[in-house]
Amino acid sequence: MDVSVLIPVLNEERHLEDAVESMLDQSFDGTAEYLFIDGGSDDRSVEILEELVARDSRIHMLANPERRTPQALNIGLRAARGTFIARMDAHAHYPRDYLLLGVTRLERGDVVSVSGPQVAKGEGRWSRRVALALDSSLGVGGARFRRRTADEIEVDSGFTGLWRRDVLLAHGGWDEGWPNDQDLELAARLRSTGGRIVCLPAMAASYIPRDSVRALAGQYWRYGFYRVKTSRRHPESLRPSQVLPPLLAVTLGAACTPVRSVSRPARAALALYGVAVLGSTLGTARTATLRDAAPLPLVYLAMHVPYGFGFLAGCGRWGPPLRALMLRSGIRRPVQR
């Protein structure tokens, strides 16, 4: 077996059949198996998968009683027979030559992981608006793999992607203590031993963002919460842009204090943030409909504020990532490996 594709599934009936169709349509001329690891779906996902298994011998279904993503990936990794491992999402769409390009790049050597840009493609009303936000600098932040490029670039992490199976096994697979942020945590471990991670523009994959403000806020709260845990283990993995949301959260708190010497500069800082949000919204309105562009300030708030308070909650849970913050401030130099 050349490639084993791991696909965690949990209540994906809405997008599952379309996603599977694009996966099976790969132009890869080697052998591939598709391992769908279901986390106890209570919609029609299992029924759909059972029908697909009966129709195509390349498709296999595994059970994930823990229901979490890293456990699903490790279940798939243990069952995989391929020389290469690819991770795909059931709510994403991949180009036909995704596997071919990834395997070819890994076979050239000098990299341990390869993926493509993560391109948001909205379907529902709020999903479209989130996609617009993620197409802006204010929404992307420092995640280079979310930006389209003309050439291959080195990144600190990526969206899904491919690895050699022996490399993943040597590093212990995905850490199951990371229900969120497991990809970045794995990437930090790979990079800590000298591994390079690259992003190929031709491997750009589109995914469907959350379709409600509440779901988006919960997603970004979890991002911020587990970002602290990752930063404590891998201080060099903290991006400068990831420090800004917790600063925004602290500023919001400071703006509400009755002490004027504290609240006044905090409110001035919030005004600057408002100007940045307004500027980004107006920039997007030039190419998008007014109906979708007008709610963007709410989308930005649902991303930045929950992330910031999630980060602070993570500091309360695990302690602040002091070494990471010192690295970002320039107080401490990164360790040369």
Image (spheres, rainbow, N blue to C red):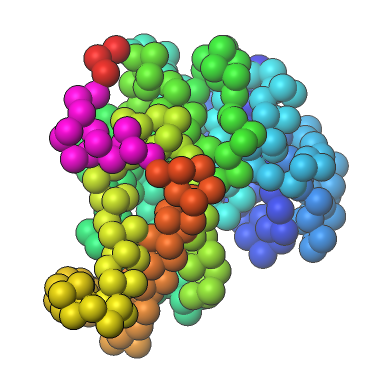
Q: Residue at x 37, y 79 (%)?
A: 298
Q: Which residue is drawn at 57% across and 55% down?
A: 91
What range of the chain is rendered magenta?
321-334
In percent of width and height, residue 268 lies at 14, 76
Residue 140, located in which quarter of the rendered image? bottom left
Depicted 64 relative to depicted 309: above or below:
above
| Residue located farthest toward the front when viewing the structure as drawn | 259
- The reply to whether residue 9 is in sight is yes
Q: Nearer the viewer, residue 242 or 204?
A: 242
In percent of width and height, residue 333 lies at 19, 25
Residue 303, located in which quarter of the rendered image? bottom left
In percent of width and height, residue 17 lies at 67, 55
Depicted 48 relative to depicted 1: above or below:
below
In the picture, the quarter occupied by the N terminus is top right
Q: Which of 201 and 276 is in front in this view?
A: 276
Q: How many marks?
A: 0
In the drawing, does residue 8 fall left or right of residue 114?
right
Q: Nearer the viewer, residue 189 or 266?
A: 266
Q: Residue at x 48, y 40 (%)?
A: 229
In the picture, the quarter occupied by the C terminus is top left
- The reply to whether residue 288 is in sight is no
In percent of width and height, residue 182 lies at 53, 38
**Is residue 244 rendered magenta in the image?**
no
Q: Which residue is drawn at 77% across and 42% down?
A: 66
